[in-house]
Image (cartoon, rainbow, N blue to C red):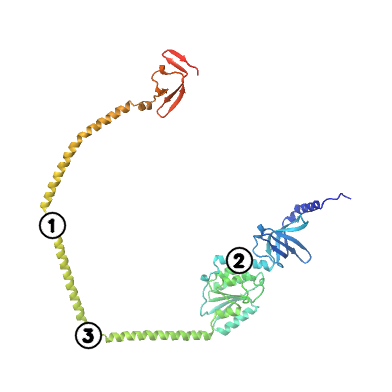
């Protein structure tokens, strides 16, 4: 018998075996949720079970934030998780990274995601939807030849508008072939160009049975149709993406036929109403014209044209007099202004002004002659400044010479130097040096410092 080991050692060994198995590091598991709890931290704890087994599962907050639905007890889901052991309790658990609804829930999730996408693209906007023709001559029907939808639509059309022609395109309305056939029929109807409106639909059913009308190929065909489309898919509570993108949604196929046509009685009433409106409009216009003719016939001007012409002549003569008076007044004012200008420009006034200006000129010239001698001292002062600058120590330094200073006194010859520090000044600064040797002609005196 082997030596006994601790429980923790067994748990760690089993956990290590689970963690080393690559298959268990990422596995898809389908099951039903029970005992689901989401804590304030965002972590989700639940049990995933089927008919015979159950496993504990945890989905941490960082992964739970990716959920597009709220998990609930009894919901079938597919999770992507890794299998490992929780050492504190020795429980084998699923650590869930992704979760999606299984079956119908997955289809509904796809439906909602695609609906949000198309709505954001503006495919459902009311502004792009077209109005149905008031009096269609031909209606296209796209549905199954075996279902009750075709019978309901055709019966309603014969009862309400027997004069309307029908073009029928038989298609599958569920299964893998449904979506391609429906989309192809819509395009075919548009190529014919003789239909005024299209009815696309089928009877009610589950979301799986109606799914063809959520497929992209059908939705795009309806969106690109140049003929107005009525969607009649399912019952009143059933909604598909085809309902939202169509120009009009009908609760049932029968309702679609009623929306597409007006009854003969309704059309007759519309004609009668329009006829009465037209009669009233014509009567009102004739009455207005008759009143205008009567007023014109009874007017004094029409009865006495000579009097009217006489009034016009009087008005013209009065206007001619006012015009002549106005022109005369303007000419008189202009002559007066011209005489005033001539007086101001009298020659004598000009001669007097010239004399005054000549006297002012002679006065200015005399003042200028008194100022001119002052220019010579200014020139002599500038020359003196130039000579001073030439002998300036700063000018000497700019030519490469230096000044040596020791004990606050500038050194003129070697004999003034003694042991110690000197300051040598240059054009752009100074340097500090130490005296080590001094030369007096041929004699050399060394100083060790």
Whole-percent x, y for residue 35 in the image: 73, 65
Helix, strand or loop at label 3? It is: loop
Q: Which of the two marks, 1 or 3, is nearer to us in this view?
A: 1
Q: CA distance from mark 3 to mark 2?
A: 83 Å
* Extreme residue in the right direction: 1
Residue underneath mark 1: 342
Q: Mark 2: few, some, or many residues within 10 Å (few <14, many ≥20)?
A: some
Whole-percent x, y for residue 219 in the image: 59, 69
Q: Quadrant of residue 28?
A: bottom right
Residue at image position (46%, 17%) is 437
**3 and 2 marks in contact (CB < 8 Å):** no
Q: Mark 1: few, some, or many residues within 10 Å (few <14, many ≥20)?
A: few
Q: Is residue 358 above or below residue 224?
A: above
Residue underneath mark 2: 114
Helix, strand or loop at label 1? It is: helix
Residue underneath mark 3: 304
Q: Quadrant of residue 224?
A: bottom right
Mark 1 and mark 2 lie on one chain; the one further toward the N terminus is 2
Q: Nearer the viewer, residue 200 or 47?
A: 47
* Extreme residue in the front direction: 407
Residue at image position (29%, 29%) is 385
Work out whether residue 187 can be spotted: no
Residue at image position (32%, 27%) is 390
Answer left or right for 316 relative to 177: left
Q: Is residue 242 above or below residue 46?
A: below
Q: CA distance from mark 1 to mark 2?
A: 94 Å
Work out whether residue 266 can be spotted: yes
Label number found at residue 268: none
Q: Nearer the viewer, residue 429 or 93?
A: 429
């Amino acid at each position: 018998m082997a030596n006994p080991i601790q429980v923790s050692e067994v748990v760690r060994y089993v956990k290590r075996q689970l963690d080393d198995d690559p298959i268990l590091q990422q596995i898809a598991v389908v099951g039903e949720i029970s005992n689901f709890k989401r804590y304030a931290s965002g972590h989700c704890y639940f049990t995933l079970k089927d008919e015979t087994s159950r496993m504990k599962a945890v989905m941490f907050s960082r992964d739970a934030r990716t959920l597009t639905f709220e998990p609930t007890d009894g919901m079938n889901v597919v999770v992507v998780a890794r299998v490992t052991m929780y050492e504190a309790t020795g429980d084998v658990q699923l650590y869930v990274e992704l979760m999606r609804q299984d079956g119908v829930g997955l289809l509904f999730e796809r439906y909602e995601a695609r609906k949000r996408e198309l709505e954001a693209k503006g495919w459902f906007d009311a502004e792009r939807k077209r109005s149905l023709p008031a009096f269609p001559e031909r209606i296209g029907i796209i549905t199954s030849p075996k279902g009750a939808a075709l019978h309901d639509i055709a019966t309603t059309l014969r009862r309400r508008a027997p004069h309307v022609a029908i073009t029928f395109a038989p298609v599958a309305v569920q299964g893998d072939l449904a979506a391609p056939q429906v989309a192809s029929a819509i395009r075919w109807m548009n190529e014919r160009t003789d239909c005024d409106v299209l009815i696309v639909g089928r009877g009610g059913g589950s979301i799986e049975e109606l799914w063809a009308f959520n497929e992209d190929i059908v939705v795009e065909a309806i969106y690109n149709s140049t003929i107005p489309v009525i969607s009649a898919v399912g019952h009143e509570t059933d909604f598909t993406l085809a309902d939202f993108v169509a120009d009009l949604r009908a609760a049932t196929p029968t309702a679609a036929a009623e929306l597409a046509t007006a009854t003969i009685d309704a059309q007759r009433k519309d004609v009668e109403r329009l006829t009465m409106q037209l009669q009233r409009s014509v009567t009102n216009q004739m009455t207005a014209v008759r009143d205008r003719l009567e007023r014109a016939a009874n007017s004094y001007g029409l009865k006495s044209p000579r009097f009217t012409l006489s009034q016009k002549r009087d008005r013209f003569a009065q206007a001619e007099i006012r015009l002549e008076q106005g022109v005369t007044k303007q000419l008189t004012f202009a002559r007066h202004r011209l005489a005033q200008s001539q007086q101001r420009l009298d020659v004598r006034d000009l001669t007097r002004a010239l004399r005054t200006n000549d006297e002012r000129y002679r006065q200015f010239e005399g003042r200028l002659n008194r100022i001119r001698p002052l220019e010579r001292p200014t020139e002599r002062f500038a020359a003196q400044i130039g000579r001073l600058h030439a002998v300036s120590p700063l000018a000497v330094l700019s030519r490469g010479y230096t000044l040596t200073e020791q004990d606050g006194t500038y050194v003129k010859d070697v004999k003034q130097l003694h042991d110690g520090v000197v300051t040598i000044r240059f054009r752009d600064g100074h340097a500090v040096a130490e005296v080590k040797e001094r030369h007096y002609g041929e004699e050399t005196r060394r100083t060790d410092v």
